[in-house]
Image (cartoon, grey):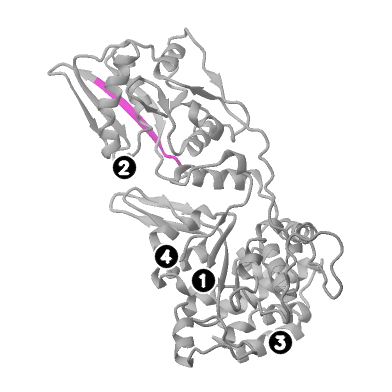
């Protein structure tokens, strides 16, 4: 047999499209050619595979070797094709049998000595292989990642020799052991935040409905402190959500931490990051911060300091929950259903509106500073709340026991989280997901307003110059407030609170 076919997976995106590696041996001068849009790392696999085959006790066939990676229109990148190419050469040259190839997929990069090295994208490859009813053989270095999938036949190998013995029926490959429960992460507690009742309430509403939130206020008032406590009050991810989020981390350069795969991501990029860093891209498209925050939180501190273009590229994923990166040969799509959390100062010096009169910025400076954040982006943010300077300094982090006289310790995250989980369960029972993601037909179905509330919304829309999109978001927030109070219908009080949490935008 001079032809062999081996199945593998591309790491183009989390869909991990299948790739058929075909190896054909023909007469002529010895040589190896690779066709099917291989990129540099794949073309270089010829030398790695040749050395690995020789150092594993096999012979490289002295014939013309043609390797085809199909489908041809799919760009191929990375070293994960080394193992299937090596197996294809050994099967085509009759040094190994082909009996197990039809129902098994292989991924892995080879060292010159024949050892298997870890590759990115092992988890989505395993997911798609199991969905196709195939077994998958992956490097032992990826075992912890592949173990997150608790179904199907998942095998691990440390070298080409191990795989060849298994294919020949003279050896066994170890099963990937199911992953143990991830270690719980101890998040900062909301009890550390004293005062700021308005900001705490907004944080709870945002967590319950997965709403976007903007915190504004002078430096040092607790905006970042509040933001860091949002993950501690969010509901846990489902297994499907956790696997999808882990698959995105697997194909990214950031890598996957199997110990924390069930924790909602909290991404806080620096304000100097580019638009590509935020939404993804590159010659071989990879997910950016927005996709790595999928099912979690994307925190943008010092919002006006971000590049204007970098912020504008977030407008599409805020609406659609996905990012599409187009290249001349292919489109890559990455999920990006994140919860946007932003923080900013009210002016360049940070003290605009301070009763002490410490701000020395001119009106023109303040206007230019705020104009760095565009109106269309602000229109897509559900909540905006002030985090004012406390009347007197409060230093209570790390204190235990009763609060000192004259001070009241904040409610702990555990109590807030229980209310958030209960409210989110009500939303999921409706079958339309978190309130922030309700489509217009779902809003009409689940967010009906009584007559008084309708009049209130109409008055607020006129006074605050709310766009139709903003009105829709106000109603969604009101639905979340009602869910937190276990109310079947939205009252005018629920709507009034939602409007109040958007009133801050009028100052812009």
Q: Is residue 38 visible?
A: no
For residue 197, side relative to residue 213 (left or right): right
Q: Position of residue 29 (x, y in %)?
A: 12, 18
What residue sits right under mark 2 in the picture?
A: 75
Q: Earlier in the sequence, mark 1 or mark 4?
A: 4
> Residue, x 19% and y 14% (percent of image)?
62
Asked whether the residues under the numbered discs 3 and 2 touch, taking CB atoms below 8 Å apart as contact, a structural biologist would say: no
From the image, state whether disc 2 or disc 4 is nearer to you. 4
Q: Quadrant of the N terminus?
A: top left
Q: Earlier in the sequence, mark 3 or mark 1?
A: 1
Q: Which residues are magenta?
A: 16-24
Badge 3 element: helix
What residue sits right under mark 3 in the picture?
A: 456
Q: CA distance from mark 3 to mark 2?
A: 55 Å
Q: CA distance from mark 4 to mark 3?
A: 41 Å
Q: Which mark is residue 302?
A: 1
What residue sits right under mark 4 in the picture?
A: 272
Q: Earlier in the sequence, mark 4 or mark 3?
A: 4
Against 192, is 182 above or below?
Answer: above
From the image, state whether disc 3 or disc 1 is nearer to you. 1
Q: Which mark is residue 269?
A: none
Q: Earlier in the sequence, mark 1 or mark 2?
A: 2
Q: Position of residue 179 (x, y in %)?
A: 63, 32
Q: CA distance from mark 2 to mark 4?
A: 31 Å
Q: Position of residue 378 (x, y in %)?
A: 53, 76
């Amino acid at each position: 047999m001079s032809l062999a076919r081996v199945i593998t997976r591309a790491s183009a995106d989390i869909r991990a499209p299948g790739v058929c590696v075909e190896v054909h041996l023909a007469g002529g001068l010895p040589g190896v050619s690779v066709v099917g849009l291989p990129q540099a790392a794949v073309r270089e696999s010829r030398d790695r595979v040749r050395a690995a085959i020789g150092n594993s006790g096999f012979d490289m066939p002295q014939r013309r070797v043609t390797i085809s990676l199909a489908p041809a229109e799919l760009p191929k990148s990375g070293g994960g094709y080394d193992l299937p190419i090596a197996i294809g050469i050994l099967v085509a040259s009759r040094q190994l049998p082909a009996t197990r190839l039809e129902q098994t997929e292989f991924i892995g990069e080879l060292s010159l000595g024949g050892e298997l090295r870890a590759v990115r994208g092992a988890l989505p490859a395993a997911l798609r292989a199991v969905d196709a009813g195939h077994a998958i053989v992956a490097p032992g270095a990826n075992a912890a990642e592949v173990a997150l999938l608790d179904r199907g036949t998942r095998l691990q190998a440390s070298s080409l020799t191990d795989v060849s013995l298994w294919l020949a029926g003279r050896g066994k490959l170890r099963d990937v052991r199911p992953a143990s429960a991830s270690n719980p992460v101890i998040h900062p507690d909301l009890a550390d935040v004293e005062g700021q009742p308005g900001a705490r309430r907004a944080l709870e509403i945002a967590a319950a409905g997965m709403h976007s939130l903007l915190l504004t206020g002078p430096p040092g008032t607790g905006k970042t402190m509040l933001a860091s406590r949002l993950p501690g009050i969010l509901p846990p991810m489902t297994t499907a959500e956790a696997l999808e989020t882990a698959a995105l981390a697997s194909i990214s350069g950031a890598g996957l931490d199997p110990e924390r795969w069930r924790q909602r991501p909290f991404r806080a990029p620096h304000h100097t990051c580019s638009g590509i860093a935020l939404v993804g891209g590159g010659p071989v498209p990879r997910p950016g911060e927005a996709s790595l925050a999928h099912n979690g939180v994307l925190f943008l501190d010092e919002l006006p300091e971000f590049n204007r273009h970098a912020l504008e590229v977030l407008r599409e994923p805020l609406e659609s929950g996905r990012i599409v990166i187009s290249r001349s040969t292919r489109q890559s799509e990455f999920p990006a259903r994140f919860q946007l959390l932003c923080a900013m100062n009210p002016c360049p010096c940070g003290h605009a509106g301070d009763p002490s009169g410490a701000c020395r910025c001119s009106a023109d400076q303040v206007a230019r500073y705020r104009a760095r954040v565009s109106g269309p982006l602000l229109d897509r943010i559900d909540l905006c709340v002030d985090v004012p300077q406390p009347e007197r300094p409060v230093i209570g982090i790390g204190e235990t026991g009763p609060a000192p006289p004259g001070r009241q310790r904040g409610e702990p995250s555990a109590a807030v989280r229980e209310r958030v989980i209960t409210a989110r369960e009500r939303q999921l029972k409706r079958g339309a997901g978190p309130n922030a993601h309700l489509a217009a037909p779902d809003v009409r179905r689940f967010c009906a307003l009584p007559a008084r509330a309708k009049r209130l919304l109409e008055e607020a829309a006129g006074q605050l110059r709310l766009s139709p999109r903003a009105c829709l978001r106000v109603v969604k927030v009101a639905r979340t407030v009602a869910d937190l109070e276990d109310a079947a219908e939205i009252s005018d009080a629920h709507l009034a609170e939602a409007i109040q949490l958007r009133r801050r935008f009028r100052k812009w």
